[in-house]
Image (cartoon, grey):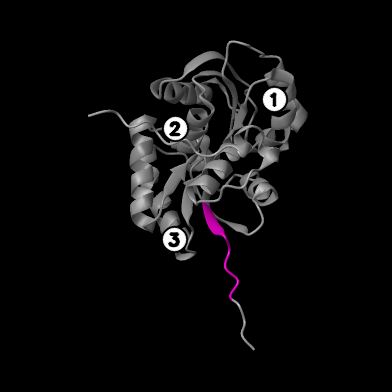
Amino acid sequence: MTYQPIVPRARLGFIIPSSNRMVEPQIQRFVPDGVVGHFTRIGMTNRHRAPLDQLMPRILDASELLGDSKCDVTVLQCTGTSMSGGVEGERKVIEAMAAATGRPALSAASALTAAFRTLGAVRLVFVSETAQDGHDRKLAFLRQAGYDIVADRAMSLANSDAYCTTPPAFWFDAVRAMRNDDCDAYFISCANIHSIDVIAALEAELDRPVVTSNQAALWCALRTAGIGDEVAALGRLGTMGLAMPAVAAE
C-alpha cells in the first residue's frame, strides 16, 4: 500500500506576547481548511516591555524556532510592540526575521499597512484598547506612515485581563459612536481583544471597511503564503487580494 503524505497548504507562524489570549483562538477559528497556524510566545508586554531593539534577540530566537516548523511566513503579532520603534524600526525587525527564517516575515504593523493600502484607506478613524500614552505611541506610528487620523479614541481598558474579557458589543458600540463619513476605514487596534467578531456588523452599519489587528495579520499572512481563499467572516478585507506597494519611477 502506498501512503500519501499529509502536506498542509501553508503553515503560518505567529510570535505573540506571553500575556496574549486572543491570537491563537481567533486564528484557529478563521484560518481556511488545509492551512495550519503555529504559535510561540515571548515576553514583550507588561513587565517584559522594553525598547524594540532590546527585544530583537527574543524575536529572532522565536523566529528561528518557528522556522524549524517550516512556516511559510512568520508574523510578529503585537500591534503596540511592532509600532513602538517607528516605521524604520519596524522595517528592520521584519528584515531580521526574514533573514533568520529564510522566508517572508510580517508584523502586526506591516499587515495593517498592507490592509490599508489594499483598501485604499488613508483617512482613518482609530480606536485602541490602551491608555492614552500607549494610544499616542500607535498614533505617532500611523502618522509617520502617512495616515490622516480624522478621529481617534483611547478606550483606556485597565490591563491584559480587561482586554481579552471585554465583550464584542463594547467595540461595536465604541466604533459606532465614532461614525465619521469622511474616513476611508475604521481601525480597531490590539491583538488581544474581541473586535474581530464585530467587523461584519460594523461594516454594514457604517458603510466603510473595518480593520482589526488579528484580521489584518491573518489576511496578510494568507496572501503572503499564496493562499487566495476569501474569508468572508473577515469583512471586506477578507475577500481581497494583496495590493503590492507602488514602485517609484526611477
- Local crowd size for mark 1, using a 10 Å CA cut-off: few (<14), some (14–19), many (≥20): some
Asked whether 200 falls inside the magenta stretch, the response is: no
Q: Which residue is mark 3?
A: 67
Q: Nearer the viewer, mark 3 or mark 1?
A: 1
Image coordinates for residue 17, horizontal then vertical, percent:
54, 45
Asked which secondary structure carries label 2, the reply is helix
* View extreme (left): residue: 250
Which sits earlier in the primary sequence, circle 1 or circle 2? 2
Asked whether 6 falls inside the magenta stretch, the response is: yes
Q: Which residue is mark 1?
A: 203
Range of magenta residues: 5-13
Q: Amino acid at mark 1?
A: Glu
Q: Amino acid at mark 2?
A: Met
Quadrant, the C terminus: top left
Viewer-nearest residue: 121 or 39: 121
Q: What residue is rendered at 65% in x and 52% in y?
A: 32
Q: Which residue is mark 2?
A: 83
